[in-house]
Amino acid sequence: MAAAIEVRSVSKQFKLYHEHYTSLKERVVHYGRIPYEPFMALTEIDFDVEAGSTVGILGHNGCGKSTLLKCIAGILQPTRGEIVTRGRVAALLELGAGFNHELTGRENVFMNASILGLSKKDTELIFDEIVAFSELDKFIDMQVRHYSSGMYVRLGFAVAVNVEPDILLVDEVLAVGDEAFQRKCIERVKKFQQEGRTILFVTHAADLVRRICDRAVVLDHGKMVIDAQPGEAVRVFRESLHGGELNESDEPEEADALPEAEASRPEGTHRVRITNVAIDHPGLRLNRNWLLPDEAMTIRVAYHANERTDDLLFGIAIHDENGNHLFGTNTGVLGLDVPAADGDGEMSFEFHRVPLLDGTYLVTLAIQSSDEGTVYDWREQQASFEVMNPSRTSGLVSFPIDVHFGLSGVDRPGIDLPGMDLVEGTGA
Amino acid sequence: MSAPPSRVPRASGEATVVRPRMTARERLSRIIVRRELLVGMVRNELKIKYKNSVLGFAWSLLNPLLYLVVFYVAFTIILGSSIPSFPIWLLSGLLVWNLFSTGLGAATGSVVANSGLVKKVSFPREILPLASVGSMLVHFFLQSLVLFTVLAAVRWHVAWAYVPLIPLALIGLLLVTSALGILLSAVNVYLRDTSHFLELALLAWFWITPVVYPFQLVGMRGGWSTKLWLTNPVTPIVVVFQRAIYAKLTNPHPKGGGPPIQLLPHWPYWGFLAYLGWSFAFGLVTLTLAVRVFGRSEANFAEEL
């Protein structure tokens, strides 16, 4: 079967003007010396999308993924290369689908459907369904200018999914709208998958890719890094995301080396200073800079006491990238005795396993007096580690899980969590 | 893969190719395929225009009436023009001019005005300037009602033999307006003051078109400046309209005596037809050029807007 989308060595160059002259007068005045820099938004992108498959395009902001989608949608033309699409293409790019603010929702639906190639008669057939899907029946005869952004997106999505597209292009829109509508959209996308339609969507939500894609293409600075299974693609995506940082030093441990205290946060009295933080995990020995879910991890802290201090407390906190506090403890809470410090010393936090799935996590470390009254040194989120999930399980936390069918099952190897036992108890 | 049953026909199998270059012929056939979209856009443009106005389409009629009053006062009363039945003379040319100038003006701004659409959805963008011309064509028909009413009221004798040339002339005018409109709409994306220049240009253009003064005033002179004047592609269309509707070639009894004054060229039928041919030639050449320029610059519309 022929591919639904063929992207053939597509390149797209933009001209970045330092000053953009958009009038004849200015062009004449500045004739011949309008400085610009050529910018390759896409370089030799080449891939096929099989009819009926769902492919994600992953990449950080500004990697060219939206440009690629716009080229496939026919809104931009590639500078070089060619794109072939087979069948009706409906595209949902950013907010809304190009509605006219002066027209009512109803008129815009007809306009939009007409642009997508539907006749008026065809649109009348699906109009009620579009309205029902968008949940805008009360507002459909209102001018679109009075719509909220959520309503706008809902209507746009409703049109795009109801015009029976063969190929649906989606750009980040699944992230907009309330949760119920998002779920509805994902359900519709799944229905499309079952119906054998082709879906290509752009996102930086690795989780979504893992959940609904058959394959994913990763872009980095306009170049295609990989075209692979979602798990593998997500891993490469995360790597490329941090590639720049890691390349600065060959030794990953050194990446965590702390700058001089004066240069960073001047927090604390620095009677005892943290001189180095190293994060160690089994992956490092395999030249892998990230952890797999449930792997062990050790955070080593080297410190220096300017004078003998015997009233010490070491604390650690772990946050995710959104600032959610995931974990925090200190030697006082744990009821541990801390040996006195004089000169250089080292201690470590050893985690038997890190029950996290995807993400980058930030580590905060502190040395305080045992009553937490005096802060000697406080390093707020200056070290980090990363977890990558090769499987298609999604979420933040790696819950230990066993799945069983049937009622009995006494002697199964399982994880003895209290909750699980409870289920077993009722089943027996 | 089995296609699901659906009520809306799916366009499966049809391959669309997005690539840097397309020929003018490919582009034109793309527009013809999407004519329903063009009609829809014309309808929407009219809707938007009259959505917030109480008088609605009456505004379209007021515009030529106002012109009529102003030019009547200026030419017949103040300057003592030698054109009898001046209102009919004026209307038969002015409506044509209005279609040209408003159509071209709207078309020039059309791509920039619809930037939301251009940035979000794919369709042959030439439809935007064409839709602007189309909506002005609807105004033209409405304004023609004013003229018809006047003609019927005074029992005016039109030159029936020349009436069949009117639709032909109208097609020629649409061709010229659309071609220039497509060209300027693309230029306007890159040079946003194109619309301002166009306004000035149209002001001058109006006076080199025989709308308020008779064709023969310039046409009878000779010399290179007249030849240049004759190349104005709007002139043949205006003259055909005047020949068919106004129908009087000379004013035998000018005010204050004197010899009869010629108003329109005393050409045979084919003379008008040939002169109209010039408009068509100009229109076709410009259209080819315009579609090519438009096609080249379209690649970057979404970035420039």
Image (cartoon, rainbow, N blue to C red):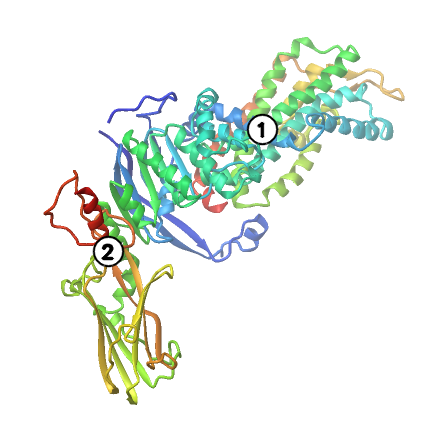
Determine the residue located farthest toward the left in the rendered image: A411
| SS of the residue under disc 2 | loop
Q: Residue A31: image x %, image y %?
A: 52, 53
Could you tell me residue A348's position as x and y percent? 22, 74
Q: Nearer the viewer, residue B136 or A109?
A: A109
Asked if one can make out residue B115 in the rendered structure from this viewpoint, the answer is yes
The amino acid on which the numbered mark 1 sits, given as a three-letter code, is Val
Q: Residue A168 appears at what percent x and percent y? A: 35, 35
x and y, in percent, of residue B8 in the image = 39, 22
Q: Between B179 and A172, which is closer to the camera in this rendering? A: A172
Q: Chain of mark 1?
A: B
Relative to A339, is B137 on the left or the right? Answer: right
Say which quarter of the image contains residue B102. top right
What residue is pinned by disc 2? A388
Residue B275's place in the image compared with A344, above or below, is above
What type is the residue that disc 2 sits on? Met
Q: Nearer the viewer, mark 2 or mark 1?
A: 2
Is the residue marked by circle 1 packed among few (<14), some (14-19), or many (20+) residues within 10 Å?
A: many
Question: Label 2 marks which chain's residue?
Answer: A
Image quadrant assignment for residue A304:
bottom left
Q: Residue lying at the far right in this picture: please name it.
A: B256
User: Residue at the location (82% across, 28% down)?
Assistant: B75
Identify residue for label 1. Answer: B133
**Foreground: B16 or A265?**
A265
